[in-house]
Amino acid sequence: MSLLIKNAEIVTATDHYHADIWCEGEQITQIGKNLPGSSNAEVIDASGKLVFPGFIDPHTHIYLPFMGTFAKDDYSSASRAALAGGTTTIFDMCIPSRNENPLDGFRQWNSQAEGKASCDWTYHLAVTHWDETVERELREVVAAGVPSFKVFLAYKGALGIDDVELFHTLKLARELGVMVTAHCENSEIIAELQKELLASGKTGPQHHHDSRPPRVEAEGVHHLMTFAELLGTHCYIVHLSCDEALQVAMAARYRGVNVWVETLIQYLVLDKTWAERPDFEGAKYVMSPPLRDARNQPVLWNGLRTGMISTVATDHAPFDFQSQKPMGKDDFTRIPNGIPSLEERVNLLYTHGVAQGRLDLHQFVAVASTNAAKLFGLFPRKGTIQPGSDADLVIYDPQFRGRLSHAAQHSAVDYNAFEGFEICGRPAVVTLRGTVMVRDGKFVGPAGGGRFLPRKATHF
Ligand code: URP
Ligand code: ZN
Ligand code: ZN
């Protein structure tokens, strides 16, 4: 079946024009004025809508054993949520535990995703310890199409690595042309601050922030930048939340370090007062790095507008409010970290970014799709609209007005962190490789047809 999108107002990171889009065999094959239909083509009239390339979330946790439990979604529910919100490709964090090797993780994540994911996916592969086997298997997984690593400078004693492990990981990445994505917080300072806070009776979710203040994140960035500068590795700082950390990253960029920065939709629209809500409700808003003081939000928007920050991700890590967040009822350090937002990211970014005049349409497409495709080796298959690209299209209705709610969401988690938030715009139709997956906010596609996207290393 072919697909013809008529009367499209096409918006990419660089272009904005009116045309029809013809898709055949999973790809866009022609773009032009007044393209003729054919009897076996599905025709969608996009009049009055904007047509964007499928959005890309460069940082999710779908399968995630973490803090003594498992994140609530699986690839089936999460990919429906992603697609309903306009995201057609996700980068999931593939995280073998400290006593597993990279191939164990790769096989485990594949077994979770294959046949269940309805959107396309790839991974960043976490390095959680270092020895000869790890090095050999990392080379194998890179050759199998995963040329990006993940390191945690936080989560001491669990996923975090030490400086010797960091050194060898960055050295290998440099040799292989691999990008290293990194969670930057100083785990030693966090551990000491946590002990002090708990000892003084500060056990509630509102104290999570003070165990990981902005300078702790900035120090993590500084630490990574020192290694990246000495070893020449290309690094991508995940979930950067604050002014202090951005300044350190940009100082490194000024010195010539190849560094890119991701922020999250949560940091752009929520602030730390959400984690201070009474009756343990703040636990819904515990994540790391923590939600920050509102003074950071204009800094992050400015970073996106000016190119200091390249991407907006979700770090989707859903844990139920009723049954999982209470693991930390009497000790905030045990609250499973994460604020789900996979389905909400694009609509919130459009609403708070484009509709409120903080980003133009091209900046919006760049930070929510194109830049991730370029940085991680998917462009131009993904991240743009041109002949030869996958027919991943979001036909977006900028006139839609509605509110986000748990009742309407596709994610399996038992709350919506943005309950009642107004959205100004929503995908009317989402296609994945030429197949309609979403209509008017509802998943209507064939389930489980998502594909693993093998990539090649580009960071030499
Ligand atoms: O709080 C967070 N960010 N949870 C997910 C794990 C991580 O650190 O990315
Ligand atoms: Zn993290
Ligand atoms: Zn994460």
Image: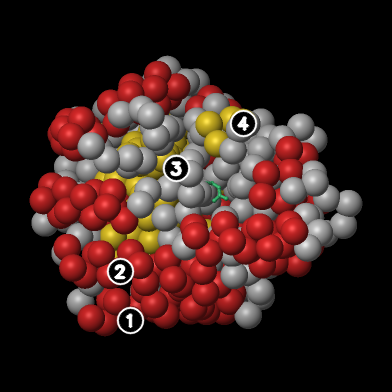
Query: On the image, numbered disc 1 is attached to which residue?
Result: 251
Q: What is the secondary structure assignment of the residue under circle 3?
A: loop
The mark found on residue 159 in the picture is 3
Residue appearing at x 39%, y 68% in the figure: 221
Instruction: State which mark lies toward you, 1 or 4.
Output: 4
Which amino acid type is marked by label 3? Leu
Which amino acid type is marked by label 1? Ala
Q: Are marks 4 and 3 in contact (CB under 8 Å)?
A: no
Considering only order in the chain, which callout, 1 or 3, is on the residue closer to the N terminus? 3
Q: CA distance from mark 3 to mark 1?
A: 28 Å
Q: CA distance from mark 2 to mark 4?
A: 32 Å
Badge 2: few (under 14), some or many (20 or more) residues near its Cα, within 10 Å? many
Which amino acid type is marked by label 4? Thr
Query: On the image, numbered disc 4 is attached to which residue?
Result: 69
Residue at the outermost right position: 279
Considering only order in the chain, which callout, 4 or 2, is on the residue closer to the N terminus? 4
Residue appearing at x 74%, y 48% in the figure: 331
Considering only order in the chain, which callout, 2 or 1, is on the residue closer to the N terminus? 2
Q: What is the secondary structure assignment of the residue under circle 1?
A: helix
Query: On the image, numbered disc 2 is attached to which residue?
Result: 225
- Percent position of residue 130, x then y: 27, 40
Please determine whether, in this image, residue 247 is positioned above or below residue 81.
below
Q: In this view of the protein, which residue sits in the foreground, 336 or 370?
A: 336
Q: In this view of the protein, which residue sits in the foreground, 59 or 80?
A: 59
Q: In this view of the protein, which residue sits in the foreground, 199 or 356?
A: 199
Q: CA distance from mark 1 to mark 2?
A: 9 Å
